[in-house]
Image: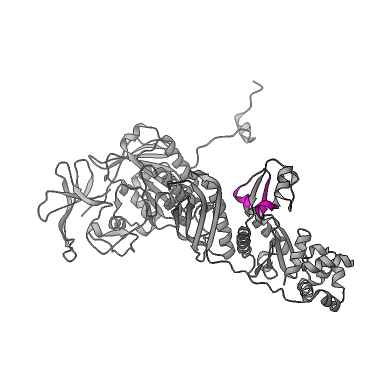
Amino acid sequence: MLWACVLLPQLALDGVLRRRPTAGPLVLVAGAAPARSIVAVNAAAREAGLRVGQRLTAAQALLARFEALPYEPEAVDRWQQFLAAVAYRYSAEVSLLPHAIVLEVGRSMGLFGPWPRLESLLRADFAALGFRHRISVAPTAHAAWVLAGVADGQAVLAPQALGRALQHVPLHKSRLPAAAAAALPGMGIRRLGQLLSMPRDGLRRRFGGELLLALDRLTGEAPAGLDAFRPPDRFDLRVELSHEVENIAALVFPLRRMTADLAAYLAGRDGGVQRFLLRLEHRDGVTDVAVGLLAPERDAGLLFELARGRLEQVRLPAPVLSLRLLARELPPFVPAGRDLFDERPANALPIEQLRERLRARLGDRAVHQLGSTSDPRPERAQRIAARDEGEQEPSPRPTWLLDRPIPLRGPAPRILAGPERLETGWWDGGQVCRDYYVVETAQGQRAWVFCAPGEQSGWMLQGWFA
Amino acid sequence: MSAAVALSSLLDAQQVWRGRAAPACRGEQPTGWAALDAVLPGGGWPAASLSEILLPLDGVGELQLLLPTLARLSRGARPLVLVAPPYAPCVAGWRQHGVDMRRVEIVTATAREVLWATEQCLRSGSCAAVLAWPLQADDRALRRLQVAADSGRALAFAFRDRRQLAHASPAALRLELEAAPRARVWVRKCRGGAVPAQPVPLALAALH
């Protein structure tokens, strides 16, 4: 077993910064109104002297202008769940620890390559999503968690090297039970190595079983006892906009982020999405924009483009306060295979994606195929997306068909072929009794026309032999 | 003159670049009409280019001109696309000409979206041929289609009114269809060759 730990030191702040990127000082505050204190600061705020734990009043004395936003514990949980779903791509065993995600990677390396390669993949994913992270790997989940807290990029790949790696970890970074961590330095024990070499009986008498269990989990003597993370079967992401948005163009940036998140989540589940809902939330009421695809997809660029295509057709009845992306059906995704001897250009857009792009802008019914039925009446001889079940017609058929027959104007045409009697439909109320002819008009057009049986006048135009 | 250099020595030293006509690959996209193939410079449709077909009226054989090509392409790997056709294609009629209708995608688009949809289809590279009926297309729009056809390696056909002949066009090939007194095709412009002086008679399928 080999566990990787992705420590997320600024989860709350990164979650906020993603939806409102700012270069100015920004802090997150928590607590009751009179005693508000800072729980997270960004780089600009730290430079100005603001610190975590400071009272908001003290911070306001230090710096005149900065943004203070409330710290939302639910948002932190939500982001952690989301990132765990992203990490699920690399391992089937993912668990959550405070401010961290641990995943079993020993078995994943066969697929993704040795640790440095897997590490760079993880780092690329988290960096692309905009979350700062520290990554380490160790034979136990808790050891990886502790090592990630000490320094970024620590890798202990062999079980026998674990003892040495833990030797010099300062006690205040070893994530032991709080009572023990507070009392031990007073006894002259400052490093984990010292603690590990102490007699267990004495430790049990003084600090109880809790400390021993924590130490055993670190070294792997006791099982980690973590709940396995299961990605939820639906995707629900909500983004509060920083101000009221009145035109669609301003929604494009958050939309790009959201569809990228959806794509990352889908990649983690190895799934696709076939239909999802964009919900534009107004002060009262919502506008729903449904995005449907012909086949499950998960490409971030494609999802964004389709969602934008649908969104651009929406007329906003009221300013938008927040944006929500809901995907309930997440069917398996089957990547399209391509032929080795494909004659298409290398950068070709697959026909499925082309269809989606056209549908997104022109409407759901804009792209279709025609198939023939076994009905001989021209009005019913073909329909959209019908399975082609007709057979070769012995009599000539035109290449263009009019939706409904219209009178043929102009001088009397010259008859080229005919008549072909069509008499049918008496059973379903759509009875026709017509003589069909192929005629040539004075302008040289060839037309498929019909008239009442035996009349050869009062021509009705049905199609063109174009 | 002592400074004079023999032409042959210059050429042998390969210091002079000699332009020569681009080698025309014969018959990459034959039209299926032997008489027309014979007069077209490439022995058929200009590959990966825009061809313009100018009509006096609908229903004068403009599809029959293309159907042999469409029948051949519908048996290939890439589908065919019709963008905003003026009428519904008659499945039975197209099948009589050998076109596999399961390979034909029909895109309905408003007059404003026709050019956009056509360009998307051409540029995607996953269509063998795109037939479009743009109502309003200027020189710039057609040039975009020409570039898209080139980048997507697709045949592009734009059907337009004969009156557009007065305006210049960036299409690689311009054909004008004449219906009366008999069906004939005038080659009005062809890239890579001289424009034939005579029209090509079009022997439309006999109908019995």
Whether residue A279 is situated above or below residue B10 in the rendered picture: below
Give the residue displayed 68% in from the left and 71% down from the top: A107
Camera sees residue A466: yes
Residue depicted at 59% across the width and 69% down the height: A230
Nearest to the observer: residue A416 or residue A423 = A423
Viewport quadrant of the C terminus of chain B: bottom left
* Residue A199 horizontal side relative to residue A38, left or right: right
Range of residues picked out in magenta:
A16-35
Q: Position of residue A10 (x, y in %)?
A: 69, 55
Which of these two is toward me, A357 or A277? A277
Q: Position of residue B85 (x, y in %)?
A: 33, 48
Residue B94 versus residue B112 in the image, above or below: below
Looking at the picture, does residue B129 appear above or below residue B146? below
Q: Is residue A420 left or right of residue B130?
A: left
Q: Is residue B192 visible?
A: no
Q: Quadrant of the N terminus of chain B?
A: top right
Closer-to-camera residue (B119/B54): B119
Whether residue A78 sits left or right of residue A49 in the image: it is left
Residue at 50% from the left image edge and 40% from the top image edge: B22
Query: How many marks are shown on the rendered structure?
Result: 0
- Residue A104 in the image: x percent, y percent? 68, 69
Asked which colour scheme the image uses, the reply is one colour
